[in-house]
Image: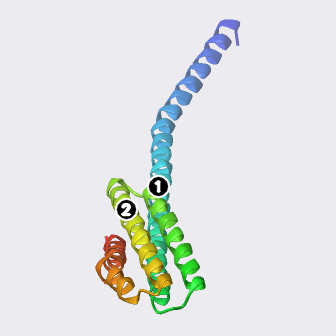
C-alpha cells in the first residue's frame, strides 16, 4: 500500500472515531442531566421529609411539655410545694425550647404560630407565678381565681393550638 492511501485510511478512521465520540457524548449528556436532576429531586424530597419529621417532633414535644406543665401547676395549686413548682418551671422552659424548634424547622405559618405560642407561654408563666405567690401567701381564693381566669385559659390555648398545628 502506498503512503497516500495509508494516510487516507488513518484519517478516515480517526474521523469515524471522532464522530463516534461526539455521538456518544451527545447521548450521554442528556442522560447525565436527567440523572443529576433525579438525584437533586431525591435529595430535596429527603430534606422535606426530615424537616417534616423535625416539625412534628417539635410540636409533639411542645404539647407534652404543656401537659406536664399543667399537671405541675395544678399540683402547686393543690399544695404540692416547691418540687411541683420546679417541675412547672422546667416544663415551661422545655415548652419554649420546643416552640423555638418549630420556629426554626417550619415554614412561615409555623413561625407565626410559634411566635404566638411563645407569647402564650410567657403569659402562662407570668400568671402561674402570680398564682404560685398567692398559694405561698396562703390566699387560696386568689390563687384559684387567677388559675380559673388566666392560667387555665392560657394553657388551654397552647394545647389547642399545638394539637391543631400537629393535625395540619
Instruction: Write down the residue under mark 2.
Output: 119
Is residue 106 positioned above or below 163 on the image? Answer: above
Element type where label 1 sits in the image: helix
Q: Residue at x 55, y 84 (%)?
A: 84
Give residue 63's quadrant in the image.
Answer: bottom left
Is residue 127 positioned above or below 9 on the image? Answer: below
**Front residue of 100 and 30:** 100
**Front residue of 108 and 35:** 108
Element type where label 2 sits in the image: helix
Residue 164 x/y as whole percent: 31, 74
Residue 43 x/y as whole percent: 50, 53
Q: Is residue 148 left or right of residue 133?
A: left
Q: Residue at x 60, y 84 (%)?
A: 83
Is residue 101 positioned above or below 142 on the image? Answer: above
Instruction: Write down the residue under mark 1.
Output: 104
Which label lies toward us, 2 or 1? 2
Residue 89 x/y as whole percent: 54, 73
Pick the quarter of the image with the N terminus.
Answer: top right
**How many discs mark residues in the rendered view?**
2
Amino acid at each position: 500500500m502506498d503512503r497516500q492511501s495509508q494516510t487516507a485510511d488513518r484519517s478516515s478512521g480517526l474521523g469515524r472515531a471522532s464522530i463516534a465520540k461526539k455521538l456518544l457524548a451527545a447521548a450521554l449528556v442528556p442522560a447525565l442531566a436527567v440523572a443529576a436532576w433525579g438525584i437533586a429531586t431525591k435529595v430535596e424530597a429527603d430534606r422535606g421529609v426530615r424537616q417534616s419529621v423535625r416539625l412534628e417532633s417539635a410540636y409533639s414535644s411542645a404539647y407534652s411539655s404543656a401537659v406536664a406543665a399543667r399537671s405541675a401547676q395544678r399540683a402547686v395549686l393543690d399544695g404540692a410545694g416547691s418540687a411541683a413548682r420546679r417541675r412547672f418551671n422546667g416544663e415551661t422552659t422545655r415548652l419554649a425550647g420546643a416552640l423555638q424548634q418549630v420556629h426554626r424547622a417550619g415554614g412561615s405559618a409555623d413561625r407565626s404560630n410559634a411566635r404566638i405560642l411563645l407569647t402564650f407561654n410567657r403569659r402562662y408563666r407570668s400568671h402561674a407565678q402570680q398564682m404560685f405567690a398567692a398559694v405561698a401567701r396562703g390566699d387560696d381564693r386568689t390563687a384559684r381565681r387567677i388559675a380559673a381566669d388566666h392560667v387555665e385559659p392560657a394553657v388551654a390555648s397552647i394545647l389547642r393550638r399545638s394539637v391543631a398545628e400537629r393535625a395540619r
